[in-house]
Amino acid sequence: MTEPKIKNMEEFAAVSGISRPTLSKYFNDPSSVRRSTRTRIESALEKFDYQPNFYAMNQNRRLTKNIGIVIPYMADPFFAEIARNVENLVLDAGYRPILLGSHGDPEQEIENLENLRVIKPAGVLLAPLGRVSDPDRLSAFCADVPTVLFDANIENVGEAFVGSDNMQSIGLMVDYLCETGEPPAFFEMKSPSNPNALKRRSAYVYAMERLGHAPLLLQAPGEGWDFEDIGFQEGSRVISERNLPSDTILCSNDRLAIGFLSAAYQLGLRVGSGAESALRVAGHDDHPFSRYTCPTLTTIAQDYEAIARKSAQTLFGMIESNARPVSRIETVFDGNLVRRGSA
């Protein structure tokens, strides 16, 4: 008995048991999938006598000069700054940027990508939400559209990731704080949205143990992206209860640190590096507002320009060569210590 005639790739995916994204990668570039997967696909092609319509595929792949840029929050100055750098590079390269924000909502993140799919973009630069993102649906999109992730990494999603080396940057800050005062406690969200936060927690623990200190974790309840409010509420509680294990607080990101600084001020505690100060507070990211807090915030500056440039150049290379890398590319940049008044 002959197998039924397969009409399209969706039917072929169903009968072969091979996912549609994997098939798309294979038909775009057979060398982009594992040898064992390639063997399975080629056996299924022979078994079901399926011949993909490459003319139709090429028609579908006719691309515009549009490049999508998707970030978690349009209103967040941190993401606005890195998106501005990316947008300028896209314009300089002769493409048209389309900037979209996901509002911290994983469904909105997917809707943004599906809306981009409709206009057949040349590629997408994506700063994903992270832990709350839907990795399977992101992978399905990335199989069809060349995509480079930046800021937050999700394993095996997209052709490349570009971001900061959290192990290096947190280690640099811990070293500085230990050299200049008490070893820091680490102030973070217990269930952070962004995967960078989990990497920073691990980097802090490693750096403290490397220096012979016991890690001290202060974990704030709360979820989502209202970091300043979470930092303020939990900061107010631990300060009021006199429950701080150290007079030095390293916050997982600058937005938490801004909330913590506000809590300290409201409760009459002086923050700074002088003998008259009760607390030292530091952050991470060099958020645009960190230079205007009171006192100004000691932090780690991410190299916005380098991250934006590498992300864009990686995507442009894929578009212009009409080829995807055989293996996923990950590039991280060192952070720089910015010493200000808070620590």
Image (cartoon, rainbow, N blue to C red):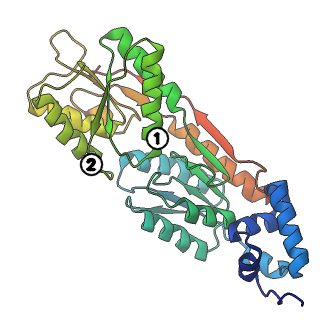
Residue 338 image point, x, y percent: 40, 24
Q: Answer yes or no: is residue 51 visible.
A: no
**Amino acid type of the residue tagged 1 in the rendering:** Asn
Q: Quadrant of residue 142?
A: bottom right
Q: Image height check: is 157 above or below 12?
A: above
Q: Say left or right for 336 vs 138.
A: left
Residue located beneath label 2 in the image? 222
Residue located beneath label 1 in the image? 196
Residue 195 image point, x, y percent: 46, 44
**Amino acid type of the residue tagged 2 in the rendering:** Gly
Residue drawn at 80 percent across, 86 percent down: 6
Task: Name, please, the residue furthest toward the front.
Answer: 1
Q: Depth check: give the residue in front, 201 or 111.
A: 201
Q: Say left or right for 196 vs 232.
A: right
Q: Say left or right for 335 vs 321.
A: left
- Mark 2: give few (<14), some (14-19) or many (20+) Cα within 10 Å: some
Q: Quarter holding the N terminus?
A: bottom right
Of helix, strand and loop, which one carries label 2?
A: loop
Q: Answer yes or no: is residue 133 visible.
A: yes
Of helix, strand and loop, which one carries label 1?
A: helix
Residue drawn at 43 percent across, 49 percent down: 79
2 vs 1, front mark: 2
Q: Say left or right for 26 vs 248.
A: right
Q: Image height check: is 51 above or below 125?
A: below
Alpha-carbon span between mark 2 and mark 1: 17 Å
Q: Quadrant of residue 136?
A: bottom right
If you read the primary sequence from the N terminus, does the residue marked by circle 2 or circle 1 appear first?
1
